[in-house]
Amino acid sequence: MWDFLAHLNPVHGTYIAVYSGAKNATLVGQITCPLGARVARLSYVMPGAAPDSGAMCALLDYLAVQAGEWGALYLTAEVDEVSPAFESLRRAGFTIYTRQRVWQFSENGEPKNTSPKRLWQTMTNIDELPVRNLLQSIVPPLVQPLDLRQHSPRLNGLIYRQEGDLLAYAEVVYGPLGLWVQPFIHPATEAVPELLLALSNDLPPWAKRPIYLGVSSYQAWLEPLLENLNAGVGPRQALMVRRLALEQKIPARVHLPALESQRAEPSAPFVRPYKSDANYDTTPNNR
């Protein structure tokens, strides 16, 4: 029912396709793409362990065509590297552009933050520009065109300021069985373990559920800190992309006016011309 209602929302484009193969292989796949975005996302494919890789490739090809009709330039997907769907995505033209690992703070296994001080604050409209500047300084340029946050008109999450400077941002997605948190922490941030631990306390009281942290490969220096906090480690995921458009370099022609047709404007020189004649008199009467 939720997928059906989301499909009727004109702001968030959602498309579901069903593929029935000759070998009784029935697959269901969904893609999402916000209105006007250039990056579409593969939400799921069921079942993930498809018995027929050809059926999987056919379904992915069809979804890629639909994403291209929406104007998307890229179709991204997240998949475990040990999953059978990983090879199917590769055969369908997907390539890896970065990796991430999922960590979990369970309700019973996590250490408790005894500090009453609130470290994370809910971001406001004033924090929009500083957060985007922080993301551009942390996310590699190769990943930025594929990062949905770079194309989102509105960011939603928590921020952390150190001596007035915004040095950390945590994107939060609320789900019925848990919370997905994507932290972006600047290397100059102090007391990072306490900052990670404070996520469990600084979230709204009604959102006390298991917390899943997605740590990208360019933030891998956070993983030893999470391990020391007894966070559960999950499988490593490959973030893959299929490019839906071919890059073509077009020379830009710049029209310059002909110098011969321009007339030089007379102006007084800034520096007096130097004369090598030793008899040259510099008195005011002879200038």
Image: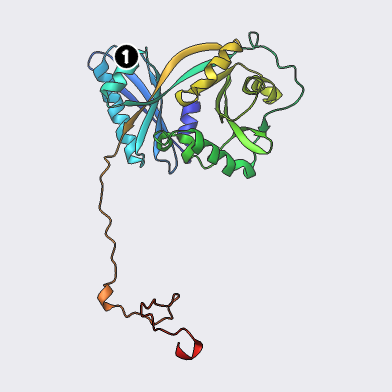
Taking the spot 28% from the left edge, 28% from the top edge, the residue there is 61
| Rendered position, 158 above or below 103 | below
Q: Please name the colour scheme applied to the rendered image.
A: rainbow
Q: Quadrant of residue 53?
A: top left
Q: Secondary structure under badge 1?
A: loop
| Residue 227 in the figure: left or right of residue 244 | right
| Residue 196 in the figure: left or right of residue 233 | right
Q: Please provide percent x and percent y for residue 10.
A: 47, 41
Q: Which residue is denoted by mark 1 in the rendering?
A: 50
Q: Please provide percent x and percent y for residue 157.
A: 60, 32
Q: Please provide percent x and percent y for residue 275.
A: 37, 78
Residue nearest the viewer, comparing 30 with 136 = 136
Q: Quadrant of residue 79?
A: top left
Taking the spot 42% from the left edge, 18% from the top edge, the residue there is 237
| Rendered position, 38 above or below 277 | above
Taking the spot 69% from the left edge, 36% from the top edge, the residue there is 163
Residue nearest the viewer, comparing 254 with 265 = 265
| Residue 76 in the figure: left or right of residue 192 | left
Q: Quadrant of residue 200?
A: top right
Q: Residue furthest top?
A: 109
Residue nearest the viewer, comparing 179 with 216 = 216
Image quarter where the C terminus lies is bottom left
Residue 105 seen: yes
Residue 9 seen: no
Q: Residue furthest right?
A: 116
Q: Please provide percent x and percent y for residue 71.
A: 35, 42
| Rendered position, 273 above or below 8 | below
Taking the spot 56% from the left edge, 37% from the top edge, the residue there is 155
Name which residue type carries label 1. Answer: Ala
